[in-house]
Amino acid sequence: MLDRIALLLLIVGGVNWGLLGIFRFDLVAFMFGGQAAIISRIIYVLVGISAIWCISLFFKEQELIEARG
């Protein structure tokens, strides 16, 4: 379940970065009152934590293969 939440947050972050890159539009800041708003900052931090968490997904498949073999 935690993997899915992390992936969802990374999707939100990825879409936000795409909008920033293409249109210079920060969706999170727009929705929650600016980049400095506490809710926006919390979302940015959660996306960052999710990215760190998802590093472990690179190694999960290898662990499953080794466990089966």
Image (tube, rainbow, N blue to C red):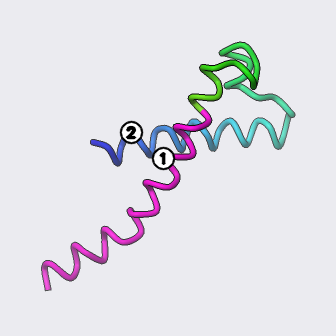
For image coordinates 50% across by 38% down, the residue present is 9
Secondary structure mostly taken by the magenta-highlighted segment of the chain: helix
Q: Tell me residue 4's x, y (percent).
A: 36, 43
For image coordinates 45% across by 45% down, the residue present is 7
Distance Cα–Cα, label 1 vs label 2: 8 Å
Amino acid on which disc 2 is placed: Ile
Q: Residue 67 is drawn in which quadrant?
A: bottom left
For mark 2, what is the residue? 5
Depicted 2 relative to depicted 23: above or below: below
Amino acid on which disc 1 is placed: Ser
Determine whether, in the image, residue 15 is placed left or right of residue 23.
Answer: left
Query: In the image, which is nearer the foreground, mark 1 or mark 2?
Result: 1
Q: Secondary structure at mark 1?
A: helix
Q: Secondary structure at mark 2?
A: helix
Q: Tell me whether the residue at label 1 lies in contact with that at label 2, contact meaning CB atoms closer than 8 angstroms.
A: yes
Q: Tell me residue 23's x, y (percent).
A: 85, 34
Choose the circle earlier in sequence order: 1 or 2.
2
The quarter in which the C terminus is drawn is: bottom left
- The local crowd at label 1, few if under 14, some if 14 to 19, many if 20 or more residues have their Cα within 10 Å, is many
Q: Give the total of numbered labels.
A: 2
Determine whether, in the image, residue 63 is placed left or right of residue 58.
Answer: left
The range drawn in magenta is 44-69
Determine whether, in the image, residue 38 is placed left or right of residue 26.
Answer: left
For mark 1, what is the residue? 50
For image coordinates 46% across by 39% down, the residue present is 8
Determine if the magenta segment contains residue 26.
no
The quarter in which the N terminus is drawn is: top left
Determine if the magenta segment contains residue 56.
yes
Q: Tell me residue 47's x, y (percent).
A: 55, 41
Q: Tell me residue 55's x, y (percent).
A: 46, 62
Determine whether, in the image, residue 38 is placed left or right of residue 51.
Answer: right
